[in-house]
Image (cartoon, rainbow, N blue to C red):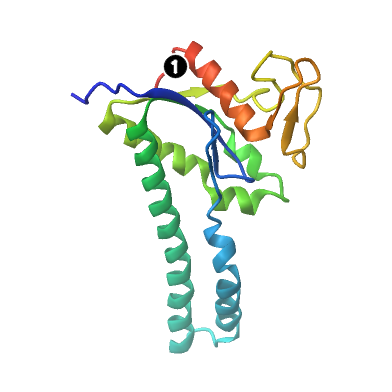
Amino acid sequence: APPEHAGEAIGIDVGLGSFAALSDGETVPPPKFLLRSERQIKRAQRVLSRRKKGSKRRAKQREKVACLHLAVSRQRDDFQWKLAADLARRFSRIAVEDLNIRGLIRNRHLSKSISDASWSAFIHKLEHAVVKTGSRLVKVDARNTSRTCSSCGWIKDSLTLSERTFRCEKCGLVLDRDVNAARNILRVGRDTAEVT
């Protein structure tokens, strides 16, 4: 049986401005592995497109492109496993949004960044990590977590992606948008009984 975890509870909001924002104010910067390797991959794919089909040089170049993609995938996996293990060790209850990733990827302006962040893979890794430490993972409804004030509960009419700071017109709270959302996720996660 896994040990009982005696740590605190935490809410996590995944995003593009920061890979993860925690309800205690801590933020994890986005690693952007694909973006950092994109120029090298594009160059290798251009070389591949010029190679004659069926030739040995084309097969060799195809392997080179595949190796570049594999390196990005492994970097992303390593980063996510380490972060998931660290969070599972530190916190007894982790609340995350139950996101519709497939729906979000339909946005053509954000699809590459969302795919590079790979939120669903990270949450899957968290599900495995909490089993070993005795922590619990709670998935909460994502509706209005960014638009709701974590202090008084006032809901803002609209919030664009370019607005990175949440300003409450009722109580005057000024807070990072993602940290505010993480606090709301934690509040809902404490109330919900759905535990993974």
**Residue 174 in which image quadrant:** top right
Query: Is residue 69 visible from the viewing direction of this image?
Result: yes
Q: Quadrant of the C terminus?
A: top left
Q: Amino acid at mark 1?
A: Glu
Front in this rendered view, residue 137 or 47: 137
Q: Categorize mark 1 by other alpha carbons within 10 Å: few (<14), some (14-19), many (20+).
A: few
Q: Residue at x 43, y 59 (%)?
A: 75
Query: Is residue 137 visible from the viewing direction of this image?
Result: no
Q: Which residue is mark 1?
A: 194
Task: Specify whether 95 is left or right of 115.
Answer: left
Residue 16 lies, with reference to residue 138, above or below; the image says below
Q: Give percent across and percent down for residue 97.
A: 54, 28
Task: Specify whether 43 is left or right of 123.
Answer: right
**Residue 83 in which image quadrant:** top left
Q: Give percent across and percent down for residue 180.
A: 63, 27
Element type at mark 1: loop
Q: Quadrant of the N terminus?
A: top left
Task: Specify whether 180 is left or right of 123.
Answer: right
Q: Residue at x 65, y 40 (%)?
A: 104
Q: Give percent across and percent down for residue 157.
A: 81, 22
Residue 117 lies, with reference to residue 187, above or below; the image says below
Task: Specify whether 77 is left or right of 161.
Answer: left
Residue 29 lies, with reference to residue 190, above or below; the image says below
Front in this rendered view, residue 125 or 183: 183
